[in-house]
Amino acid sequence: MLKDNYRKTIYTVEIEVARPAKDVFAHVLDLPRWWPEEFVGEPIHPGSEFVFRIGDSHYSTNKVIEFLPNERVAWITTGSRRSSDDFDLTGTKMIFALTPKGGRTVLTYTYEGVVLEQEYDRLVQICDLCIKEMFYDFISSFSTSIEVAKPAHAVFERITGDVAKWWGFQDLAGSSTKLGDEFIVNHPGAHYSKQRLVEVVPDKRVVWLVTESNLSWLKDPEEWNGTKMIFDLTGNGQGTLLHFTHWGLTPDKESFARCSEGWNMIIKDYLFRYITNGIPHFL
């Protein structure tokens, strides 16, 4: 029986992305990298269980109940609590369905469960934000990978130790090693950006948030503001796989083509050589 201020609801949001279903499915499963709450648990697979948290204010336990590779995945909330008002969404289902469309894929997300009467509009806003912005940006943002014959800690140290030696700008000031550090890249007449380290997991992950930017060759010089540079490291026994994402650098951005070309050169050439043999871009 529903509580007086609860209502059952089904809300669906849909997006179309220029990726095959296999790629979209893999990105959906990669919840730690795009879901707005902290993800704790094992990788998503049939019957897997995991937790979403927002600090100490909210948590939910969840279990995968449907898993059709490249077609559909769903989980059900098995327990939850929001400390501010004890709202409980237990029994709610989150459903992702994929439909191929040529070389593209339509992703349909459905929230099927309960919501507080006065929070339906907020639920709609959150669902739209998660799928139309956070997931879309995650799957559409520029990304590239390199594999190097070095352990993860050595790769981590190269990325964070001296950015100027591999990014390709000598005019760089600040620090880039620990959480909260900030550094500025200033190439007069072409590029200015200020980055803050907002996530640092030694030997595994580094995230820079662009807090200020001025790319003078763009119609909107501040187009990079709010985007993130994400470095994910995975040891594979023979070395380390480095996956780089410029989150928010999507095909609809004016800078996408030029910056994608630049990042490919920086990551696959400058950074690869610096990690592999210690040769900085600027000698």
Image (cartoon, rainbow, N blue to C red):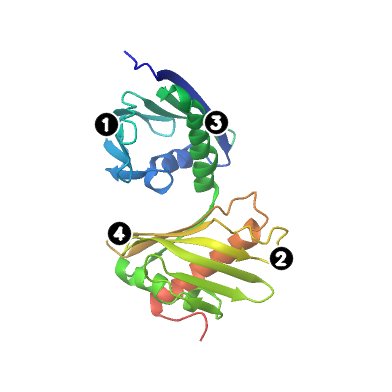
**Residue identifier under label 2:** 217
Given residues 244 and 40, the one toward you in this image is 40
Q: Amino acid at mark 4?
A: Asn
Could you give the CA–CA distance between mark 3 and mark 4, rounded to whole angstroms? 36 Å
Q: Which mark is residue 236?
A: 4
Q: Amino acid at mark 2?
A: Trp
Which residue is situated farthest in the bottom direction here? 283
Q: Which image quadrant for residue 64?
A: top left
- Mark whose residue sits in front, 3 or 4: 3
The x, y position of residue 89, in whole percent, is 34, 27
The reply to whether residue 90 is visible in this rendering is yes
**Residue identifier under label 3:** 14
Sequence-first tag of 3 and 2: 3
For the residue labelled by badge 2, is the local secondary structure a helix, a strand or a loop?
A: loop
- Classed neighbour count for the residue bearing mark 2: other residues with Cα under 10 Å, few (<14), some (14–19), many (≥20): few
The x, y position of residue 104, in whole percent, is 57, 37
Callouts 1 and 3 close, C-beta under 8 Å: no
Sequence-first tag of 4 and 2: 2
**Residue identifier under label 1:** 47
Sequence-first tag of 3 and 4: 3
The reply to whether residue 151 is visible in this rendering is no
